[in-house]
Image: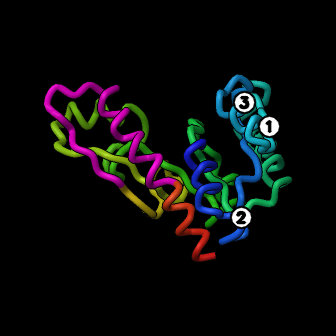
């Protein structure tokens, strides 16, 4: 999230594309990103998913909070919840995410360990459109990193993360350029 905010400023998205990071919303009130965003002067909100009766109720409240900011894009960054089909439909075409694997390989969790266990020589990250099917939307951008001998999941994750910080802002800017 911070890489996206910093890229928006450094690349003058407000001036060039009429776009800015309007808000940062989390399902965890203690999320470090909320504090950082607030320090940057960005609107923040926290909606505790455990306070809602079910997934649909939480997603409805989240939709309402997002809609208050009238976003052209809804960018998921570190949001580790499966969204309901109704939520995805509501933001269809405007909802993007990043996943720490070279999709379509290794959707879901524990991607780095799974790549190591399978003997992959390369791993990476994928920016994609969000669909109702987990980690299966249109691929917008990918980055590849080598899996090194003796790699641990944490070491591989750290290498992948450096590339996530490059490709996610780049993919968002490409979407902004398309309008």
Of mark 3 and mark 2, the one earlier in the sequence is: 2
Q: Is residue 37 left or right of residue 45?
A: left
Residue 104 seen in the figure: no
The crowding category of the residue bearing disc 2, from other C-alpha atoms within 10 Å (few below 14, some 14 to 19, many at least 20), is few
Residue 172 seen in the figure: yes
Look at mark 1 in the image and give the residue it sits on: 45
Front position in the image: 147 or 81: 147
Q: Is residue 105 left or right of residue 26?
A: left
Q: Would you identify the image quadrant in which residue 41 lies?
A: top right
**Residue at horizontal 72 percent and vertical 30 percent from the top:** 35
The x and y percentages for residue 30 are 70, 23
Seen from this angle, which residue lies furthest front? 10
Seen from this angle, which residue lies furthest right? 68
Give the Cα distance between marks 1 and 3: 10 Å
Look at mark 2 in the image and give the residue it sits on: 14
The crowding category of the residue bearing disc 3, from other C-alpha atoms within 10 Å (few below 14, some 14 to 19, many at least 20), is some
**Residue at horizontal 69 percent and vertical 27 percent from the top:** 28
Badge number at residue 35: 3
């Amino acid at each position: 999230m911070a890489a996206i905010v910093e890229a928006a400023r450094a690349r003058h998205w407000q001036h060039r594309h009429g776009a800015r990071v309007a808000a940062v919303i989390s399902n965890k009130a203690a999320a470090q990103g909320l504090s950082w965003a607030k320090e940057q002067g960005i609107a923040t909100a926290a909606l505790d998913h455990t306070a809602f009766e079910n997934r649909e109720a939480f997603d409805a409240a989240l939709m309402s909070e997002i809609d208050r900011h009238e976003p052209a894009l809804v960018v998921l960054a570190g949001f580790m919840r499966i969204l309901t089909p109704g939520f995805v439909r509501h933001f269809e075409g405007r909802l993007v995410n990043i996943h720490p694997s070279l999709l379509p390989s290794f959707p879901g969790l524990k991607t780095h360990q799974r790549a190591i266990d399978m003997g992959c020589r390369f791993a990476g990250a994928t920016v994609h459109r969000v669909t109702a099917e987990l980690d299966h939307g249109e691929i917008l951008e990918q980055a590849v990193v080598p899996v090194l001998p003796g790699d641990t999941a944490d070491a591989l994750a750290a290498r992948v993360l450096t590339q996530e910080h490059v490709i996610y802002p780049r993919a968002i800017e490409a979407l902004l350029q398309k309008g």
